[in-house]
Amino acid sequence: MKEGEETQWEYALTKDNWPFAPYKVHKHFTVSLSKDDSGEYQCLLRHKLSYDVKTSNIFSLTVSGEAPKATLLSGSTNIPVGGRVTLTCSVAGSAGWTYHWSRRTPGSDETLPVRDGDENGVMSISQGGTYWCRGGRGNPVFYTHASDEVTIQITFSNKVSVTLQTSWPHIFSGETITVRCEIQGGRDAEWEYEWRTSWSTTHRTNDDYWSTRASESHGEGYMCRGRHRRDPYSSTEWSKGLKVTVSREAPKATLLSGSTNIPVGGRVTLTCSVAGSAGWTYHWSRRTPGSDETLPVRDGDENGVMSISQGGTYWCRGGRGNPVFYTHASDGVTIQITFSNKVSVTLQTSWPHIFSGETITVRCEIQGGGDAEWEYEWRTSWSTTHQTNDDYWSTRASESHSEGYMCRGRHRRDPYSSTEWSKGLKVTVSPQPKAQLSADKRTIPAGGRVTLTCSVDPSSGWKYDWAVVTLQPDWTEIYRGERISVSCEIQGGDTEWTYEWRTPSSHTPPSYSEYRISSVTLSHSGSYRCRGRSDYSFTEWSDEIRLTVSSDKPRASLTADTTVIPAGGRVTLTCSVDPSSGWKYDWYRDNKLSEPLNTRDADFHTTGQISVSQGGVYSCRGGRGDPVYYTEKSQEVTVSGPESSSFPVLLIVGLVCGIVLIIVLLLCGFRKSTGESLIIKNL
């Protein structure tokens, strides 16, 4: 505003029609603005003398909350030696900026200004480095945020290639490989090297090689470039990628032997190889006799061939590279030193005929081997090798085991030294025979005996064992809830037996001689058989014994020879339980079930009979076993006392009347002497 001389006016600012800056004599206002200061501003002029006020036009001002960020663009980030590139700096959405340029010095974090106050924001450079810029305006200068960095590389024209530093093209996962970066024409420069792969970040080395562990996923390519050691922004182009074939699994070595059996003093050649790859050296190992300890025999053998004269289990593996990468170990090859002693197998029984299930013993005889300490190996067509410390072997015969038994001796101090296998001993094995039992009589005479004869034809050498089943107690009929025992007795031998049972019940029977049933049920009815087993031999099954279990509790039966007790006599009572045995009886009178009769109450005769001389209502019941199993109480029997007689009664009445008459006569005589009258009333 121009209104006369400036000295006659005062100036103030309003914001949104509200005072913002008070009146002062200067027309310039310097304020620090924030985002809240956005709005419409107006200048007020007030005359110092007249106090006339004039207003300016309205000025809209927008204040951003955050300082802007400069943007730096580059035509290219790689320029050849002697070339140039143009950098452009700008601040979007605002004006009035000048530009300030900076560059990081090589090998440090120090930043140097390149140019300040550049108004057009464009700079042409020929020097490599990391550049950035920022805008500034006003007084004091207000700066934008610095731009993102742009790294300019100076690229040498030297051709670069990667080579694999191994003599074998096939690489295995886990193997350490070395690649080399070759820069043509770059020998006079001092380089450091950068390596790049498709699976990892950039890796740097001071030397022109890089050793890394190969993986199946690492076959896509290895690339490298050289960077000038004095100027890290000067480098070569990246090489082309070197592809490497990497197999997933380490290979397995193969060990071959010309023979696995050599005579004493002989030699055998072992050959180790790794198929499909090269560059291997071979490492040999041998297991020491009598332990699992492994000792190295030879390391770093290049031809993979070794001649040996010592028995043992050998294996090998290949190794190559630094550090050494090993293959999987080969399968073991066992080399046996063979003695020339003749070996034979003999059967150690006195009978030529063998039956299935029978235990036989074979013996290994080594001619001329008496001074050696042997252990013995046995081989058959139906089983794996069996070893014994003694020269005999006991085994169970089977019909399929007739083909042959072979043996050989192995030196106890050197398990890799042995004789040849003997010829096979053939043994005839027949199905298990059945014993024949006969008796000279079928019925045992009173006080006599029956002779039983057991035989096995047509063979010899037998001892006979008899299996017999007995019932304890030996009652023919059992009632539900009673306790019994079924016993198996092996007669004719002193062998320690285990026992097998055949029973009608689903309950699992024991493996010992007594089968106890604490409370029988209907399911226990049926036949019982047993047999004895010892190692691989059995007795025949015993004859069966049948057990009958009744479901209803039995009732005792009570009878009397008469129901009236004769004068001076007794009545005989008989209690019974049919059709079974083993009962003892309890007797009761007048329903006193808690007080059974004893010898003071009755005469006890044979089991089930008593004699009584006292009338009453009698009953009985049977009991047997331990704990006692009781029957139901019998029916009641009433016994009357002795019969009546008139003679004793009349005698007693006559005596009483005679005595009364005598007393009356005496009284009459007494009354007459005293003069008193006597009145006799009817008695």
Image (cartoon, grey):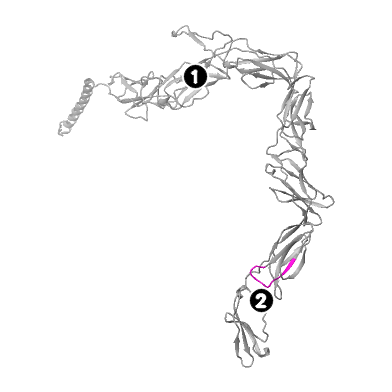
Dot 2: few (<14), some (14–19), or many (≥20) neighbours within 10 Å?
few
The residue most toward the right is 188
Magenta region, residue range: 91-101
Front residue of 435/100: it is 100
Query: Residue 207, image x and y in percent?
Result: 80, 48
Query: Residue 75, image x and y in percent?
Result: 71, 60
Relative to 390, residue 190 above or below: below
**Which labelled disc corresponds to residue 530?**
1
Quadrant of the frame with the C terminus: top left
Q: Is residue 487 left or right of residue 416?
A: left
**Which labelled disc corresponds to residue 32?**
2
Q: What element carries label 1?
A: strand
Query: Residue 395, image x and y in percent?
Result: 62, 18
Residue 181 belongs to the span the image colors magenta: no
Query: Residue 421 occupies which quadrant of the picture?
Result: top right
Q: Is residue 622 left or right of residue 268?
A: left
Q: How many labels does the image show?
A: 2
Of badges 1 and 2, the one in the foreground is 2
Query: Residue 163 occupies which quadrant of the picture?
Result: top right
Query: Residue 77 occupies which quadrant of the picture?
Result: bottom right
Identify the residue at horizontal 60%, vertical 90% (top origin).
Answer: 52
